[in-house]
Image: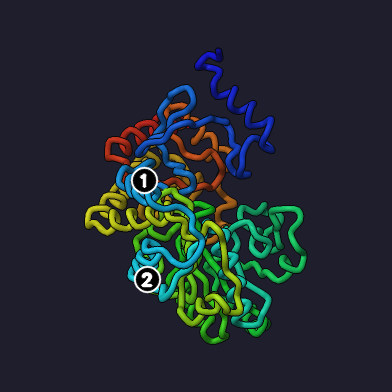
């Protein structure tokens, strides 16, 4: 019988025998290579039983906290009387669609799938079908999923800035060539491309806040300028709110900015960790995806009852007046605390984030685009997080990655984390 101390290694070795690299998603293999076997509220527990305050949060889904009791109960209730039927609509699906259309400014109709990558894939296909054009514009530092048209130019080496930087072998050259990559927050660059190629551009897609490189806040004039230009050139504007949807408000970050796109994609937080994604937007566009329409949209597990029930419960909790107040107050407490520690110790660092998201870049401002982040001290960034992990604070030890606070976190969790951060930063 294996000892407790060897349990993690035993699991790792078993996984590596049968799963390529031992993980089912490429970005899950990090050092230290820990094995987590339980999650509850604000905490995750490794195979040896050690508890960590979790700020990685699986890249963001458990907005309410892990295994949130109300959500879990609603899922159990739903699954006690139904599962995958695969024909027609369900009552829960119809209710959820109405709720999303009620809250998200761009949502006149909505389609459900299972991941953010599926949603962005469908959005781009729809844009190409509507416009009859092939090219799209994305922005350096934004991540929109794993498909060929957009799997490029996220955390790009300095020597490849300004070039296409595909992240996988096997991507179709035609798809890569039809994607134009521009600097975030640079409206002039967009204007110049549209002057030359506007009639060839089907869509502009962007993360409203490029959270896949931490937090780079958009300039209001940039986002409004994109809206104006896309209308002028009859281009479909797509807001990727896979991260920001629900996390920054039930209306997404588009409601914060007051700019409404043609299409919106959401996933992660909308079902508190259950696999669910949505493509929402103008009714006249989404009606192309109706049965018999010219754009095919399908999936056996789309609008799975468990995920839909989880999403309805999540929305009900987020509709309570104190929910976002609690989230945003904890985020401010963390960011203010980190800023005070950095200043006290005279460390070259910048606290960034919005709402319930935070991180510490080891660099000075400004931070307006990905190229600014090339100044970040990547080694110090990762070393800092590894040191926090030894103190029971889990922030993903990968350069530029964001951290997430959930409704399950408490002020005491934040204060304990700040104490650990102070110890580590003092040593740095």
Vertical placement of residue 243 versus 128, above or below: above
Q: Between residue 98 and residue 216, name the one nearer to us.
A: 98
Vertical placement of residue 343 versus 100, above or below: above
Q: Position of residue 61 (x, y in %)?
A: 44, 49
Residue at 67% x, 52% y is: 157
The image quadrant that residue 108 belongs to is bottom left
Q: Position of residue 80 (x, y in %)?
A: 37, 47
Q: Is residue 14 visible?
A: yes
Q: Between residue 116 and residue 197, name the one nearer to us.
A: 116
Q: Position of residue 11 (x, y in %)?
A: 58, 26
Question: In the rendering, which numbered label is found on residue 101?
Answer: 2
What residue is shown with label 1?
A: 76
Q: Earlier in the sequence, mark 2 or mark 1?
A: 1
The image quadrant that residue 14 belongs to is top right
Vertical placement of residue 3 versus 282, above or below: above
Q: Is residue 366 visible?
A: no
Look at the numbered disc 2 and give the secondary structure of its residue. Answer: helix
User: Tag 1: Cα neighbours inside 10 Å, few (<14), some, or many (≥20)?
Assistant: some
Q: CA distance from mark 2 to mark 1?
A: 26 Å
Q: Nearer the viewer, mark 2 or mark 1?
A: 1
Q: Position of residue 78 (x, y in %)?
A: 37, 51
Look at the numbered disc 1 and give the secondary structure of its residue. Answer: helix
Residue at 45% x, 50% y is: 274
User: Tag 2: Cα neighbours inside 10 Å, few (<14), some, or many (≥20)?
Assistant: some
Vertical placement of residue 383 versus 299, above or below: above
Colour basis? rainbow
| 180 relative position to 58: left or right | right
Question: In the rendering, which numbered label is found on residue 45?
Answer: none
The image quadrant that residue 378 belongs to is top right
Check whether the beta carbons of the residues at disc 2 and disc 1 lie within 8 A of each other: no
């Amino acid at each position: 019988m294996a000892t407790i101390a060897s349990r993690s290694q035993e699991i790792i070795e078993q996984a590596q025998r049968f799963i390529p690299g031992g993980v089912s998603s490429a970005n899950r293999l990090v050092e230290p290579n820990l094995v987590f076997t339980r999650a509850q509220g604000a905490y995750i527990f490794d195979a040896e039983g050690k508890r960590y305050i979790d700020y990685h949060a699986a890249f963001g889904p458990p907005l309410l906290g892990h295994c949130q009791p109300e959500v879990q109960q609603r899922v159990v209730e739903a699954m006690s009387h139904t599962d995958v039927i695969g024909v027609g609509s369900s009552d829960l699906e119809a209710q959820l669609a109405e709720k999303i259309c009620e809250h998200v400014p761009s949502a006149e109709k909505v389609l459900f799938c299972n991941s953010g990558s599926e949603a962005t894939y469908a959005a781009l296909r729809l844009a190409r079908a509507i416009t009859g054009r092939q090219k799209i514009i994305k922005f350096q530092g934004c991540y929109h999923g794993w498909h060929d048209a957009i799997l490029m130019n996220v955390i790009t080496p300095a020597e490849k800035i300004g070039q296409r930087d595909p992240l996988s072998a096997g991507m179709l050259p035609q798809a890569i060539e039809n994607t134009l990559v521009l600097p975030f927050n640079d409206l002039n660059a967009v204007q110049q491309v549209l002057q030359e190629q506007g009639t060839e551009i089907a869509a502009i897609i962007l993360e409203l806040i490029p959270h896949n490189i931490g937090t780079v806040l958009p300039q209001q004039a940039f986002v409004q300028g994109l809206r104006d230009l896309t209308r002028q050139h009859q281009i479909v504007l797509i807001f990727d709110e896979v991260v920001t949807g629900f996390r920054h408000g039930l209306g997404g970050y588009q409601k914060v900015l007051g700019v409404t796109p043609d299409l919106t994609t959401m996933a992660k937080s909308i079902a508190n960790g259950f696999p669910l994604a949505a493509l929402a937007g103008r009714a006249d566009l989404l009606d192309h995806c109706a049965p018999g329409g010219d754009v095919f949209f399908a999936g056996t597990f789309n609008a799975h009852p468990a995920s839909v029930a989880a999403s309805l419960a999540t929305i009900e909790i987020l509709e309570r007046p104190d929910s976002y107040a609690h989230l945003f107050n904890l985020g401010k407490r963390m960011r203010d605390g980190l800023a005070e520690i950095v200043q006290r110790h005279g460390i070259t660092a910048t606290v960034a984030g919005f709402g319930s998201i935070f991180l510490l870049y080891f660099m000075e401002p400004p931070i307006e685009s990905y190229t600014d982040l090339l100044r970040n001290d990547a080694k110090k960034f990762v070393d800092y997080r590894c040191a926090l992990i030894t103190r029971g604070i889990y922030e993903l030890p990968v350069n530029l990655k964001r951290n997430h606070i959930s409704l399950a976190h408490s002020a005491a969790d934040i204060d304990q984390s700040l104490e650990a951060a102070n110890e580590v930063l003092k040593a740095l």
